[in-house]
C-alpha cells in the first residue's frame, strides 16, 4: 500500500455531486490517492505523512472561476476602488476619491478608477466629465462602471483620445451627448478610443499583476480560473507575460487562456505564434477565443429583443457587430480549432451568437465535442436553451450578478425578464454544465456570495429573484468546480476529490453543509488552499504549522 504524503481528516470532505461525502482523504505527490472513512484513510499513514485536522470544517474541490479577467483584475488592484461595498455610494464620494488620487499624480498622468455602480449611488446617475474636471483638472481621468461596458472620462481624457463634438460614433459603440454637449460617457467599442491612447504597461508590470491577482484567488479557495480576453489591453505582451509567469513559477493558479478575438485583438498573431487549443506551459493552458456580442443589462447595452423599460423607450441595447461580421469571425475561429467563448447577455445577442455557432458547423468541422460557450448567457429563451443542448454549447453564467445587480435588472427590464435570468436550476436539470464565475473585476471574487445567491436567489438588498431557480449547496459547488473544469476540458484533471485527480483542495472555515445558508453571505472564509498537493494559502497559519 502506498504511503500518503498528506492526509486530511476530522471534517466533511465533499468529493463531488455524484460522489457525495467522505470522512478523510489521502494525497500522494500532486494527486489524490484515496478518499473514504477515517479508518480506511488512516491505513495510508506512514512515518513521513503530514496530517491536517479539519477540526469540523469542510473540504471542497479547489474552486474554479470559469470566467474572470485575472490580469486586468490584478492591474485594477492599483486603481481607485469605486465599488459600492467600499463606501462609494454617492457621486460626491466618487469625486472625492478621484480627487485624492489626482493629488498624488503629476500633471498629465492618468487617473483610473473602477467599479462604480450608478444604481448604487444616491443620485442614481453616472458622474459627468465636468464633475471629473472639477476634481482633476490637470489629469486625464477614466472611471469604469462595474460592468466594464460603460465608462466616464473627463475633458482631458477626451482630448487625448481625439473625442470631440463631431467625432463619429464607432460601430457597436456609444458616445453620449446631452443638450448638444459631451457628457463623457462612453459605451462598448467607443471605449477603445481611450484604451488606444493610454500608456501601456510593460511585461514586468503585467507579470506582477498576474501574480498579485493569482495570490488573491488562492486566498479565496480558487485553484483554477479562465482569463476571459487575454490581449484586450496589452496585446501580445499579455501572452508574453503569461508565458514568462508560467515558466518561472509566478502563475499561482491554473489558467485557461481565452484570447481576445475582436478586430482590435490578437487573434491573428496569437494563432500565427502557435498559441492554439491544446498548448500548455506549466499551469497555463490555451483553448478559447473571445468575441464580444453585446454589453451589459445594468448598463442598458445588452442586446434585447424587447426594449428596456427605463431611459429611451426604443433602446434595445447594442450589438457590437453585424450578423455577417459576427458569424464570419465565429466560423473562422471554429475552423481554426478554438473553443468559442462568446460574450452575449441579452436574448437578441444570444440569438446572433447561437445562430453563428450553428452555421459554423460543417462536415469537415463539426460542432459536436467542441464545448463552445456562451459567456454570461443571462437572458435567454427556452428555445435557445434547447438549441444549445442539441449542439453541446455550454452557458458560463455569473450568479453573483443576481446578488449585485438583481434589483437593477428588475428596474431595467421588469420583473418577468429579471426572474427568468441566469436559470441555474433549469440548466442543471436539463443536463448542462453552467460554470459559475464572477467576471471579476466586474463583480466580487468572493465565492461565498456567489454560493449564497445560487442557493437563495437573493440580491444584496434581500430581494428574491425567482426562488424556483435556487439550487442545493451541493449543486452550487458542483457549478463552481466540476462544471468549470468541464468547460475547460479539464474534468479528468480537476473538479472533484477522487483518486487520480489533481489534489486541488479548498478548506473552508465552517461545515457549510450544516449551517444556515444565510451565513454564506458574510461569515464563511477560505482557511486553506492546496494546489497539486502543496499548501499555497493558509489563512490562520495553523494548518501549515500542524503539517510540519
Image: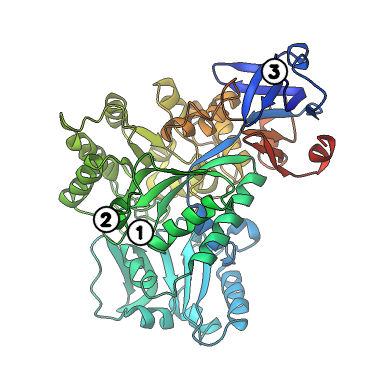
Image height of 206 relative to 51, above or below: below
How far separated are the C-alphas under marks 2 and 1? 39 Å
> Which quarter of the picture shows residue 503?
top right
Q: Are dots 2 and 1 in contact, CB under 8 Å?
A: no
Crowd band around label 2 with a 10 angstrom C-alpha radius: few (<14), some (14–19), many (20+): few
Above/below status of 515 relative to 317: above
Quadrant where the C terminus is found in the figure: top right
C-alpha span from label 2 to label 3: 48 Å
Per the model, the C-alpha gap separating discs 3 and 1 is 66 Å
Q: Can residue 466 be seen in this view?
A: yes
- Reading the image, the residue beneath label 1 is 311
Please state if 41 lies on the left or on the right of 60 as rendered. right
Question: Residue 260's image quarter?
Answer: bottom left
| Nearer to us: label 3 or label 1 | 3
Of the two numbered discs 2 and 1 in the rendering, the one whose residue sits closer to the viewer = 2
Nearer to me, 84 or 1: 1
Picture coordinates of residue 463, whole percent (x, y): 56, 40
What crowding class fits label 1: few (fewer than 14 Cα within 10 Å), some (14-19), or many (20 or more)?
few
The first of marks 3 and 1 along the sequence is 3
Mark before the other along the chain sequence, 2 or 1: 2
Which comes before the other along the chain, label 2 or label 3?
A: 3
Circle 3 packing at 10 Å, graded few (<14), some (14-19), many (20+), is few
Read off the residue under disc 2.
268
Q: In which quarter of the image is the N terminus?
A: top right
Residue found at x 48% / y 69%: 202
Q: Position of residue 201 (x, y in %)?
A: 48, 69
| Residue 2 tag number | 3
Determine the image quadrant of residue 279. top left
Amino acid at each position: 500500500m502506498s504511503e500518503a504524503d498528506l492526509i486530511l481528516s476530522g471534517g466533511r470532505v465533499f468529493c463531488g455531486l455524484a460522489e457525495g461525502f467522505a470522512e478523510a482523504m489521502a494525497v500522494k505527490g500532486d494527486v489524490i490517492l484515496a478518499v473514504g472513512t477515517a479508518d480506511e484513510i488512516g491505513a495510508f499513514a506512514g512515518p513521513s505523512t503530514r496530517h491536517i485536522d479539519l477540526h469540523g470544517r469542510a473540504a471542497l474541490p479547489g474552486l474554479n472561476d470559469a470566467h474572470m479577467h485575472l490580469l486586468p483584475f490584478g492591474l485594477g488592484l492599483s486603481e481607485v476602488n469605486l465599488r459600492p461595498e467600499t463606501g462609494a455610494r454617492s457621486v460626491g464620494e466618487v469625486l472625492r476619491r478621484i480627487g485624492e488620487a489626482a493629488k498624488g499624480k503629476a500633471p498629465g498622468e492618468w487617473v483610473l478608477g473602477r467599479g462604480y455602480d450608478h444604481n448604487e449611488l444616491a443620485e442614481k446617475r453616472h458622474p459627468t466629465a465636468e464633475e471629473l474636471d472639477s476634481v482633476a483638472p490637470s489629469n486625464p481621468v477614466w472611471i469604469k462602471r462595474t460592468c466594464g461596458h460603460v465608462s466616464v472620462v473627463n475633458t482631458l481624457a477626451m482630448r487625448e483620445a481625439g473625442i470631440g463634438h463631431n467625432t463619429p460614433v464607432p460601430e457597436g459603440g456609444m458616445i453620449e451627448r446631452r443638450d448638444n454637449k459631451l457628457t463623457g460617457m462612453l459605451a462598448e467599442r467607443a471605449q477603445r478610443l481611450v484604451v488606444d491612447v493610454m500608456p501601456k504597461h510593460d511585461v514586468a508590470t503585467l507579470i506582477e499583476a498576474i501574480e498579485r491577482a493569482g495570490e488573491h484567488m488562492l486566498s479565496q479557495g480558487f485553484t483554477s480560473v479562465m482569463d476571459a480576453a487575454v490581449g484586450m489591453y496589452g496585446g501580445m505582451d499579455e501572452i508574453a507575460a503569461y508565458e514568462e509567469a508560467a515558466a518561472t513559477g509566478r502563475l499561482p493558479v491554473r489558467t485557461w487562456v481565452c484570447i481576445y478575438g475582436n478586430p482590435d485583438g490578437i487573434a491573428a498573431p496569437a494563432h500565427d505564434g502557435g498559441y492554439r487549443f491544446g498548448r500548455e506551459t506549466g499551469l497555463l493552458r490555451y483553448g478559447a477565443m473571445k468575441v464580444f456580442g453585446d454589453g451589459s443589462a445594468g448598463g442598458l447595452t445588452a442586446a434585447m429583443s424587447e426594449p428596456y423599460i427605463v431611459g429611451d423607450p426604443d433602446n434595445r441595447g447594442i450589438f457590437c457587430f453585424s450578423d455577417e461580421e459576427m458569424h464570419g469571425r465565429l466560423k473562422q475561429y471554429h475552423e481554426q480549432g478554438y473553443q468559442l467563448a462568446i460574450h452575449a447577455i441579452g436574448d437578441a445577442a444570444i440569438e446572433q451568437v447561437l445562430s453563428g455557432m450553428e452555421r459554423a458547423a460543417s462536415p469537415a468541422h463539426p460542432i459536436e465535442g467542441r464545448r463552445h460557450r456562451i459567456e454570461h448567457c443571462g437572458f435567454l429563451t427556452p428555445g435557445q436553451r434547447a438549441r444549445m443542448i442539441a449542439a453541446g454549447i455550454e452557458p458560463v453564467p455569473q450568479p453573483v450578478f443576481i446578488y449585485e445587480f438583481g434589483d437593477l435588472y428588475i428596474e431595467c427590464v421588469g420583473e418577468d425578464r429579471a426572474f427568468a435570468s441566469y436559470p441555474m436550476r433549469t440548466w442543471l436539470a436539463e443536463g448542462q454544465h453552467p460554470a459559475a464565475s464572477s467576471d471579476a473585476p466586474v463583480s466580487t471574487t468572493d465565492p461565498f456570495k456567489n454560493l449564497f445567491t445560487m442557493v437563495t436567489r437573493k440580491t444584496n438588498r434581500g430581494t428574491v429573484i425567482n426562488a424556483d431557480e435556487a439550487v442545493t449547496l451541493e449543486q452550487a459547488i458542483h457549478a463552481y468546480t466540476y462544471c468549470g473544469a468541464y468547460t475547460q476540458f479539464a474534468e479528468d484533471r480537476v473538479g472533484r476529490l477522487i483518486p487520480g485527480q489533481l489534489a486541488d483542495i479548498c478548506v473552508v472555515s465552517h461545515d457549510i453543509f450544516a449551517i444556515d445558508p444565510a451565513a454564506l453571505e458574510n461569515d464563511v472564509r477560505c482557511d486553506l488552499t492546496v494546489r497539486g498537493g502543496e499548501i499555497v494559502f493558509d489563512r490562520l497559519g495553523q494548518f501549515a504549522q500542524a503539517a510540519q
